[in-house]
Amino acid sequence: MIEPSDFGLFLKEKRKNAQLTQDELASAINKSGQYISNIEKGKNNAPPNPSDIEALIRRLGLSNDEANLFKEKASADRGRLPIEQMDYLMKHRKLIDLINFGLENNINDKCWAEMLATISGGK
């Protein structure tokens, strides 16, 4: 059985919140409603390209935070980071070492939060 991705579930939630049909949303990127349906159901193995993602964000009327999460989920669905994050990582290679350290040592969110709080003086 095919399971919807986080991106597909998020897309469906935001589409319903915007009270749009799949066809109405799909028209923003010149696709069919079936294309949106496939993403929502997990039948489409690749989310829309970056320019289509931007058009969907505008059509859905997402806030900045929602738009960032939308982009992250779409990129994760492709097994990639958003371009801005990848560029930042490539400019700051020590972050990759830090990520590898976290992976090797099973660092969880609570530990990361504590380390960040220590570094930032508890802010």
Image: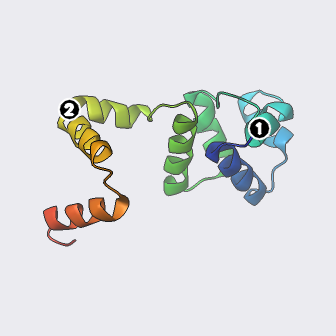
Give 26 or 70, whichever is nearer the viewer. 70
Name the image colouring. rainbow
Left or right of 90 on screen, residue 18:
right
Q: Are marks 1 and 2 in contact (CB under 8 Å)?
A: no
Number of numbered labels in the structure image: 2
Labels 1, 2: front one: 1
Q: Residues within 10 Å of mark 1 (few under 14, many from 20)?
A: few
Judge by depth and name the residue closer to the eye, 35 or 117: 117
Instruction: Report the side of 93 relative to 70 (left or right).
Output: left
The residue beneath circle 1 is 2
Quadrant holding the N terminus: top right
Q: Residue furthest bottom?
A: 122
- Name the residue that disc number 2 marks: 93
Q: CA distance from mark 1 to mark 2?
A: 37 Å
Q: Earlier in the sequence, mark 1 or mark 2?
A: 1
Q: Could you tell me the amino acid type at mark 2?
A: Arg
User: Measuring 14% from the left and 70% from the top, which residue is drawn there?
Assistant: 121
Image: 12 above or below 56: below
> Callout 2 environment at 10 Å: few (<14), some (14 to 19), or many (20+)?
few
Secondary structure under tag 1 reads loop
The three-letter amino acid code for the residue at tag 1 is Ile
Q: Secondary structure at mark 2?
A: loop
Query: Which residue sits at x=35%, y=32%?
Result: 86
Q: List x then y, in percent, for residue 3.
A: 73, 42
Percent of width and height locating residue 22: 83, 42
Task: In the displayed orientation, state which residue is furthest to the front.
Answer: 105
Q: Nearer the viewer, residue 77 or 109?
A: 109
- Residue 113, image x, y percentages: 29, 64
Q: Is 106 positioned to the left or the right of 56 in the image?
A: left
Q: Is residue 80 left or right of residue 113?
A: right
x and y, in percent, of residue 13 in the image? 72, 55
Give the number of the disc on residue 94. none
